[in-house]
Image (spheres, rainbow, N blue to C red):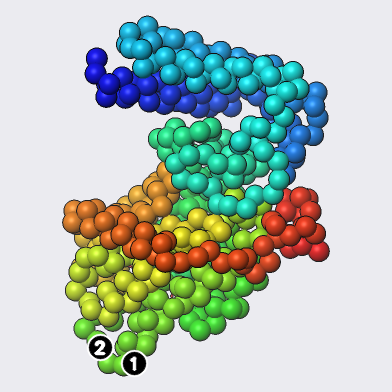
Amino acid sequence: MDWITQGLLALGSVLLAEVVRDSYHVLAHVWGPLTRIHAIHHKVYNTNLEVLSTELYRKAHWYGDVPEATVLVMFSLAFVFLTQAPGAWLGVAYSTSFWLSGLARANDLLKNTDLNHKSGPLTTPPSPWLVNRTYHWRHHFDDGNAYYSGVFSLVDRVMGTSISLKGKTIAITGASGALGQALMQELLKRKAKVIALTSSDWIAPEGILVKRWSIGEEQALAELFKGVDILVCNHGLNPHAACEWKDIEAAYAVNTFSVLKLMELFLDTVTTSRAYATKEIWINTSEAEVSPAFSPLYELSKRSLGELVTLKRIHAPCVIRKIILGPFKSKLNPLGVMSPAWVAKMVVNLARRDIRNIVVTINTLTYILFPLKECAAYWYYRLLTKPQASRVGDAALTPNSSPAQQERGEEPS
Ligand SMILES: NC(=O)c1ccc[n+]([C@@H]2O[C@H](COP(=O)([O-])OP(=O)(O)OC[C@H]3O[C@@H](n4cnc5c(N)ncnc54)[C@H](OP(=O)(O)O)[C@@H]3O)[C@@H](O)[C@H]2O)c1
């Protein structure tokens, strides 16, 4: 076998070990005998990931981590046996290192060296491909039946457990519109609590809380946003052929600046460990970012929004997803071909797989042009911008914000 094949088998052996580890973890949440043992691990930490009991910590490693690593070693050896490739021994070495570190921790050595359980407040959002502390924190304190992955987020992405919507408070603008209503139904199916933000006198169906707002009065939502986990900015206006000054003003006010203002207000509420881990913003920009929508002012205002979201989310304290949609039927686009219900279903399914740029369209060009444009813009803005020193009240870094306050999502006293 050549070096490239050996290298690929070596990487494959590591990936296999991680898939086995995550599958074992899933099993530990569904199969009684393992569940009882794994429950010990979940009792070890407080929300600051500090060890509550050394006794439980050691027990969790003896009965949880060491057997888990033994299974990894066995699968890695089976892979070597099947492939007969020297490169596959990397997986054995990788798995054995976890077996040894599990043994060491069970004997009170290597304390606070496990990257996913290092103690201290969270200060970054969950990372997309490699599991970081914030990502794993959610498995302990947001929803134990999601966020199973330990190193690569692959298994969660396949299972749709990258985000749990259960019990999340989700506020959505443009609620009375075609997509707004469909999205709310889809989120309710996932057991989220939905708040409809509407600028009209629309009456919401049962089970949905309504809050009225209007363009220019975004500040009035600041207090509400403190208790919101996910903000979906979905309102939008299509000026079609209009191009007078008043139309330009209206298109940018609704499609661009009100969204950016809501985003800023929401980002100011990301001040606790829980907020870093669970708060998100989803912004419905449109495929007009890269493809024609046959409405110049709509395209211009949505493109400006898209670019500014790309710029702002580089250093944002929480996850910001873009929703890039093709034509679906609504008041805004009566000629749309997709159904809002299907689009909403796809959006939620892709968000649950942690897709940060959710593209749903019938236009194949968008699938090619959008990633190219987004990648180029991201690197250009990244190279030419600096992270803000601190946002309004970075409580996770503020000494007088206690872990208990952070757990409850409270402001520092
Ligand atoms: N339809 C498409 O083909 C398509 C394609 C790509 C992207 N999109 C985007 O998808 C989102 C939803 O649109 P939709 O197709 O579902 O259209 P829609 O049925 O017309 O809904 C749009 C909603 O936006 C809100 N809105 C409109 N003008 C507003 C204003 N001046 N101030 C505050 N809110 C206002 C209204 O909701 P409230 O009355 O509840 O506030 C309205 O119902 C929009 O952002 C749109 O740009 C649509």
Q: Is residue 337 left or right of residue 238?
A: left
Q: Residue at x 81, y 64 (%)?
A: 413
- Percent of width and height locating residue 312: 46, 66
Which mark is on residue 296? none
Whether label 2 touches label 1, CB < 8 Å: no
205 lies above or below 265:
above
Q: Is mark 1 within 8 Å of ligand 1?
A: no
Q: Residue at x 41, y 62 (%)?
A: 383
Q: How many numbered badges does the structure rendering display?
A: 2
Q: Residue at x 21, y 83 (%)?
A: 241
- Tell me where residue 81 sits by quadrant: top left
Using the image as rendered, state which of residue 117 and residue 408 is in the foreground. Answer: 117
Q: Amino acid at mark 2?
A: Cys
Residue for badge 1 = 246
Q: Is residue 111 left or right of residue 87?
A: right
Quadrant position of ligand 1: bottom left
Q: Residue at x 25, y 65 (%)?
A: 290
126 lies above or below 288:
above
Q: Is residue 374 left or right of residue 122?
A: left
Quadrant in the picture for the N terminus: top left
Using the image as rendered, state which of residue 148 and residue 208 is in the foreground. Answer: 148
Q: From mark 2 to mark 1, how far is it between C-alphas?
A: 8 Å
Residue for badge 2 = 243
- Tell me where residue 34 sits by quadrant: top right
- Percent of width and height locating residue 159: 43, 35
Q: Amino acid at mark 1?
A: Lys
Using the image as rendered, state which of residue 214 and residue 341 is in the foreground. Answer: 214
Instruction: Tell me the crowding category of disc 2: few under 14, some 14 to 19, or many 20 or more residues within 10 angstroms, Cα based.
Output: some
- Of helix, strand and loop, which one carries label 1? helix
- Percent of width and height locating residue 108: 76, 22
Using the image as rendered, state which of residue 190 and residue 160 is in the foreground. Answer: 160
